[in-house]
Amino acid sequence: MTRLERALLFLFLIGAANPLYAAEGSNLPRIANFAILAVALVLAVRKPLAGYLQARTDQIRAELADAREKTAKAEVELAQATALLAHLDDEVQKAKQEAKKAAEAERERILSAAETEAARIKEIARKEIDNEVENGRRKLYARATELSVALAHKKIEAAMTAQDQTRLIDRSIELLEKSKS
């Protein structure tokens, strides 16, 4: 405390403790005491109160500036969100169209692959059928040949006499001798 503040405080205490000035019906002593008290309080509390009020003012200004900044950011984000929402229906439609196109392309690809596979399976089946028919012909031809030979053998046995057999043997020997020479 400064000297002046101490002096005023002292005067106040003296005035408050001594009702000397309290004359009948006069408010002057009370007013003087109040004035001294008010001056003393102002002098005593002025610097701390001024520092507190200045700090509080600075804090409120900083909070206001921060609030303005946050408001500006929120407005920008709101504008962006509004723009996104405005284009959301377009984006959904675009995504649906792209999905539809992709599904149609996949359908076409699957159909094409199925047609190609069906043609390949038909070709394989045709080749297998041709092979089976050819194998059947060969077997049938071989069986027909066996039966023809067996039938011819039976006919020859039935029609051949001992004289025919001797003549065939002699002829075979002659052919062998000619082929050796």
Image (cartoon, grey):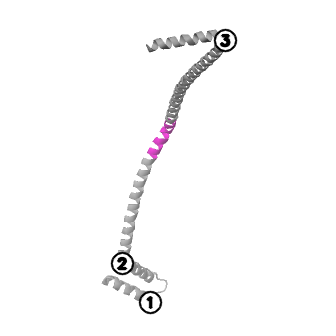
Whole-percent x and y of residue 107? Answer: 54, 29
Along the viewing direction, whichever of 32 and 27 lies nearer the viewer: 32
**Label 2 amino acid?**
Leu
Q: Which residues are magenta?
A: 78-92
Along the viewing direction, whichever of 174 and 125 lies nearer the viewer: 174
- Is the residue 7 above or below the residue 79 in the image? below
Mark 1, secondary structure of its residue: helix
Mark 3, secondary structure of its residue: helix
Residue at mark 2: 43
Q: Please identify the quarter of the rendering in which residue 63 is found.
A: bottom left
Q: Residues within 10 Å of mark 3 (few under 14, many from 20)?
A: few
Which tag is nearer the camera, tag 1 or tag 3? 3
Residue at mark 3: 155
The residue sitting at 54% across, 12% down in the picture is 172
Of the numbered discs 2 and 3, the one sitting upstream in the chain is 2
Residue 72 within the magenta-colored segment of the rendering:
no
Residue at mark 1: 17
- Is the residue 17 above or below the residue 65 in the image? below
Which tag is nearer the camera, tag 2 or tag 3? 3
Q: Is 36 situated left or right of 152 in this image?
A: left
- Measure how far apart labels 1 and 3 are at the Cα level: 171 Å
**Label 1 amino acid?**
Ala
- Is the residue 49 above or below the residue 62 in the image? below
